[in-house]
Amino acid sequence: MRIGFIGLGKLGLPCALAAEQKGHEVFGVDPSPLTRQVIETRKLAYIEAGAQEALEQSKVRLVGMPTLVRDAELIFVAVQTPHSPQHEGITPVPVTDKADFDYTYLCNAIQDLCRELVAQDVERDVVVISTVLPGTVAKYIRPIIASYGLTGRLRLAYNPFFIAMGTAMADFLDPEFVLLGIDNHSTACLVRDFYATIHARQVRSMTVENAELTKVLYNTFIGTKIVIANTIMEFCHKTPNTNCDVIADALTCATTRLISGKYLRGGMGDGGGCHPRDNIALSWLADKLQLSHDLFYDIMICRDDQTKWLATLIRDLRGDLPVVLLGEAFKPGTNIVVGSPAKLLAYWMEWEKGDTTPGTVMKNLKVGGLRELLEAMVEPPTP
């Protein structure tokens, strides 16, 4: 099948490479100079398991929108829906300044696509995979499609991926399940046919609105598990003869009611480009819908408080030793720092010293690897 991607960034490119490995012809549109450099040099600017090797052997290419619309049998829209830095989780969650995601890039991409569909007078099946809050497709995307007279001709599906940065290719090739929000039966069949060539996992079809909400709740559920795990960690720190990992291992035996032990380890909070920001966005939506209680804000405040407690613990135990953070990435196996709990910890370390200005968060903290840590701890020899 000929697959077109609108957006070949950290989400689109690994998935495009994975689809190509399954025998599909893949090409894409992306205006980013960084993306063009990655495609032309065949060298990734970020860490993604298996992607560098796949890219070196890949025939994935950048094309213009006219070529993509003309040649693609199925089009995936994988453009960013960003939050501002104060909403990504590297600083404490804003008390009042909550916000929806920024849909500018997504709307612009849909408009560019619609213009080309009209110019070529063709119909296409289009799958949006960008993360959005529930109601976004109805509020923003469908009106754009209608304004170009393409209702029924641009056949839309919403298919957000459950992938993690660093393992995006593996997660795409072997997901827990496929989430598919559908308006059109023929598009649903085409998407199912595509995934049948990728894996044998279940495809869960539902309304677009159900799929929109399922995606963000999936992410925030993980954040909730991590908050619980870190609560266990703090309990154990303050309770003699207890061990948070021993307790977590016991809880993972409850596979019927507690599901699994993944994300159930004491440590820093969750991070990345999805989890913290999705909680903050759902907290904004909870205010808009006037929910009886905003659980999502509570989760983020708990994340803040637990990280603040960890910073205080480090201060109390450090003595005269310097503090060294072993990198700023939000998890092992990636160099992405978006939503990094390490950077949030750095914020609270500065807060402990009385400086709460986000711009000076990393100023007095060393950030490096094991070599830097050892050099900081070993006293230089006396001449």
Image (spheres, grey):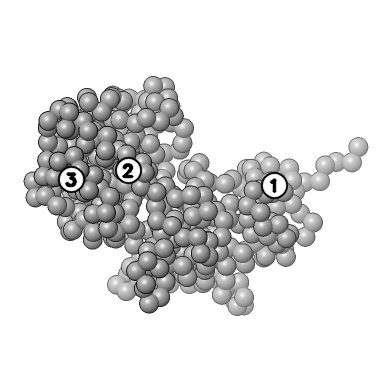
Residue 7 location (% of width, % of height): 33, 36
Residue that carries the numbered disc 1 in the rendered image: 363
Quadrant assignment for the C terminus: top right
Q: Is residue 225 visible?
A: no
Helix, strand, or loop for circle 2? helix
Q: Earlier in the sequence, mark 3 or mark 2?
A: 2
Answer yes or no: is residue 98 visible: yes
Mark 3 neighbour class, 10 Å CA radius: few under 14, some 14 to 19, many 20 or more: some
Q: Nearer the viewer, residue 316 or 10?
A: 10
Residue at image position (34%, 31%) is 30
Residue 344 lies in quadrant? bottom right
Name the N-terminal-most of marks 2 and 1.
Answer: 2
Task: Identify the amino acid type marked 3.
Answer: Ala
Q: Residues within 10 Å of mark 1 (few under 14, many from 20)?
A: few
Q: Secondary structure at mark 3?
A: helix
Query: Disc 2 or disc 1, which is closer to the eye?
Result: 2
Q: CA distance from mark 1 to mark 3?
A: 51 Å
Do residues under tags 2 and 1 come within 8 Å of each other at their CB atoms? no
User: Of label 1 and label 3, which has the lower sequence position?
Assistant: 3
Q: Is residue 88 left or right of residue 13?
A: right
Q: Amino acid at mark 2?
A: Leu
Give the x, y percent position of residue 21. 25, 33
Q: Amino acid at mark 1?
A: Lys
Q: Is residue 145 above or below residue 295?
A: above
Q: Nearer the viewer, mark 3 or mark 2?
A: 3
Near-viewer residue (369 or 9): 9
Residue at 73%, 42% in the rendered image: 375
The residue labelled by disc 3 is 146
Residue of label 2: 106
